[in-house]
Image (tube, rainbow, N blue to C red):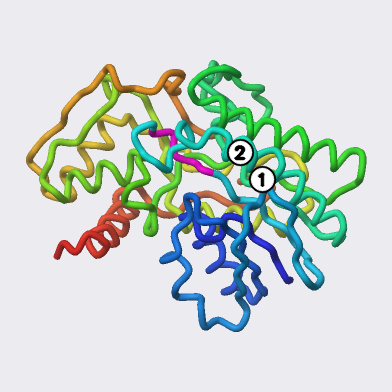
Amino acid sequence: MRILLTGAAGFLGSHLCDRLLYEGHVVVGLDNFVTGNRENLVHLVRNKDFTFIRQDVSETISVRGKLDAVLHFASPASPNPDSPFGYPNLPVETLKAGSLGTFNTLDLARINHSRFLFASTSEVYGDPLEHPQTEAYWGHVNSVGPRSMYDEAKRFSEALIMAYFRSKTSDTRIVRIFNTYGPRMRLDDGRVVPSFIQQALRSEPLTIYGDGLQTRSFCYVDDLVDGIYRLLLTDEHLPVNIGNPVETTILDFAETINRITGNTAGLEFHSDKRLGNDPERRCPDISRARDLLGWEPKVNLEEGLVRTITSFREKMGII
């Protein structure tokens, strides 16, 4: 297939480029580098099956030649208000990527009669009252809260995609992505994995917002990409959770990173800095992914963290 991938220079997008090319597809990557990183695509410059377009997905998209698939992965994704790349500091850009950007990519897919896949998020469940979260759960989301620009952009996109599917018979798919980590995350991303690893490698105490008892489920990027690719090849139109169902507290996660890195500086708690509407528990029910895709994660947390920490050492110039 010839595939357009928006957000191609991002952490997840660049890994997905690699997988698509490995599978023999031709990839057209699109990114405006608001949060994407050029370094993530340097290794693809000489690949004859990869081309790149620098463009904002919220503007009209024009791609020459037939496209067999359009994958919309462009959006800021970090909730950290202290990071310049966090969506609290890019609220309009985030909302435009999840509204105009979704319109543009859906129309491009419709014109090309191509399949469409959208990167949604576990954030559509908000601070969930159901646990673990199934795709049938409608969510518990604050539409005017500090995370609303991201949550509602994704929820709007899902509604728009289903409207295209139902009224225009567009060939659409929706993946709901849970916390993902691995090499190529930005050092200045502001999310918990890069923040903790950097602090540990600098022998600093790991900063925990709140009491650390809030939970997440961390999926290694290779596993996530495998699930996304399998979904692309199916005819499933309703949302599918892709994530690791093994739940861990932020406190345990921090202690694991300190143990792996040998950091003895401990932990530092900041209860006043936790972003409002931060979910207390986050864990996917992946029954549909198992049934529909024959997928489940293979890389355990410790193995994935060792790989990620190694890549961060290289980025930070720490031997």
The residue at 63%/79% (across/down) is 49
Are dots 2 and 1 in contact, CB under 8 Å?
yes
Where is 224 relative to 212, above or below?
below
Q: CA distance from mark 2 to mark 1?
A: 6 Å
The magenta stretch spans which residues?
Answer: 76-80
The residue to which callout 1 is attached is 291
The residue to which callout 2 is attached is 287
Which quadrant would the C terminus be assigned to in this image? Answer: bottom left
The residue at 58%/53% (across/down) is 227
> In this orientation, which residue lies closer to the viewer: 67 or 245?
67
Give the image location of residue 82, x and y in percent.
Answer: 34, 34
Give the image location of residue 42, x and y in percent.
Answer: 45, 73
Would residue 111 appear left or right of 194 to someone viewing this image?
A: right
The residue at 10%/45% (across/down) is 203
Q: Amino acid at mark 2?
A: Ser
Where is 23 relative to 213, above or below?
below
Give the SS element for disc 1: helix
The residue at 27%/62% (across/down) is 315
